């Protein structure tokens, strides 16, 4: 369905002109937990990440050629989002911009940079108190990625690890920080059924989002797979464990991703998806969503009955109007692949 625009869109876009988009991608997530074995099982058996032996009460997991993407440290602690910048100069420029705005910035010590497997980093917090890091020079591994279960692989590279979504008590207090200081670009937003604000830093539809739930903390992080079957089989695995599924299989309205959500040992969700759209940041125009967060599915098992009924009604209304999103384009078939496809059709 074509995006709807209004005068607010132009004002939103104009407010971002001249703000450098220093952050290039979500590089890693750090989670504090006293349930390391449960995280190990979730990350490898369900998500298909590769465990990296670290010791010392820390579990680390690979998703690609990077040394690590997810780190789970023993003990309590709010999650940390690690945002990647191009180089040391970009990191210094970001630190200077934050300090000029009155934000406290800590230069990461050598020991912490070594733990994160990066060349350099800074640590700071958003106005809500969310722990953030920015870094450059992520280390790559010496061996190929070996998934924890048979999957086609994760969609990372220049798109980064995936995306992260925060619960917020007051989105208006946070939007200027992420948009004007960090340089995140607004992708789209919604006012109903609750406030939602999506931001991009590369071609991924959104690498970050705010959900106006009235709460604080991490809502979920997302990883994207290379095959729909990876997601479907993950959904089957999650369904075998009581209480693991938080949202059933469904498709999102704005990024067109087909996914499900799993409960994690830390009380937030992880979204496991495939087929999200890639946008062109140079030409993208932000707009207000009108059709709810999901085109179909994503039955919210974690909600009370009344809230589930309300979310279901929004999806049914979109279905009644025939709201559709384009399917991902299949790769071109040539040579033997083309012949095999012809034989299959016959």
Image (tube, rainbow, N blue to C red):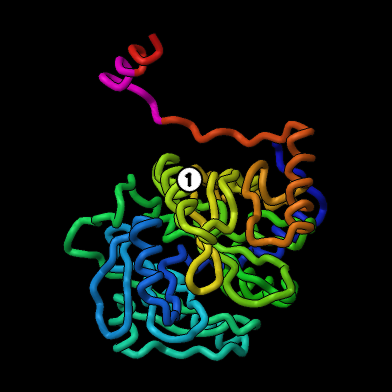
Q: Quadrant of the N terminus?
A: top right
Residue visible at 57% across and 80% down in the picture: 130
User: On the rendered structure, is 152 left or right of 22?
Assistant: left
Q: Residues within 10 Å of mark 1 (few under 14, many from 20)?
A: many
Q: Name above or below for residue 237 compared with residue 20.
A: above
Residue matched to label 1: 274
Residue nearest the observer in this picture, 88 or 318 = 318
Residue nearest the observer in this picture, 205 or 37 = 37
The answer to if 160 sits in the magenta stretch is no
Q: Do we see residue 201 in this rendering?
A: no
Pinpoint residue 211: horizontal percent, then vertical percent. Answer: 68, 65
The answer to if 333 sits in the magenta stretch is yes
Q: Specify start and end residues of the magenta stretch as a single range.
A: 331-340
Q: Quadrant of residue 304?
A: bottom right
Residue nearest the observer in this picture, 277 or 101 = 277
Residue visible at 56% across and 52% down in the picture: 205
């Amino acid at each position: 369905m074509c995006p709807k625009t209004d005068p607010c869109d132009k004002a939103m876009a104009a407010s971002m002109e001249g703000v450098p988009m220093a952050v290039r991608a979500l590089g890693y997530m750090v989670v504090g937990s006293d349930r390391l074995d449960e995280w190990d099982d979730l990350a490898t058996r369900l998500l298909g990440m590769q465990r990296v032996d670290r010791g010392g009460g820390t579990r680390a997991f690979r998703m690609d050629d990077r040394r690590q993407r997810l780190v789970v440290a023993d003990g309590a602690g709010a999650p940390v989002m690690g945002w990647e910048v191009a180089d040391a100069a970009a990191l210094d420029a970001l630190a200077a911009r934050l300090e000029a705005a009155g934000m406290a910035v800590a230069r990461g010590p050598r020991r912490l940079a070594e733990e994160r497997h990066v060349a350099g980093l800074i640590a700071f917090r958003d106005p809500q108190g969310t722990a953030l890091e920015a870094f450059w020079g992520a280390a790559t591994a010496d061996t190929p990625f070996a998934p924890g279960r048979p999957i086609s692989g994760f969609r990372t590279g220049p798109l980064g690890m995936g995306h992260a979504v925060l619960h917020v008590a007051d989105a208006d207090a946070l939007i200027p920080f992420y948009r004007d200081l960090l340089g995140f670009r607004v992708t789209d937003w919604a006012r109903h059924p609750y406030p939602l604000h999506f931001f991009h830093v590369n071609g991924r539809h959104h690498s970050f989002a705010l959900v106006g739930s009235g709460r604080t903390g991490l809502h979920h992080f997302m990883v994207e797979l290379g095959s729909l079957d990876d997601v479907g089989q993950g959904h089957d695995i999650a369904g075998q464990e009581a209480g693991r599924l938080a949202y059933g299989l469904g498709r999102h309205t704005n990024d067109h991703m087909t996914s499900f959500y799993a409960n994690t040992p830390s009380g937030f969700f992880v979204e496991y998806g495939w087929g999200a759209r890639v946008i062109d940041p140079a030409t993208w125009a932000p707009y207000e969503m009108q059709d709810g967060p999901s085109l179909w599915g994503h039955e919210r098992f974690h909600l009370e009955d009344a809230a589930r009924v309300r979310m279901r009604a929004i999806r049914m209304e979109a279905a009644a109007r025939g709201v559709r999103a384009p399917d991902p384009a299949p790769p071109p078939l040539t040579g033997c692949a083309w012949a095999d496809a012809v034989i299959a059709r016959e």
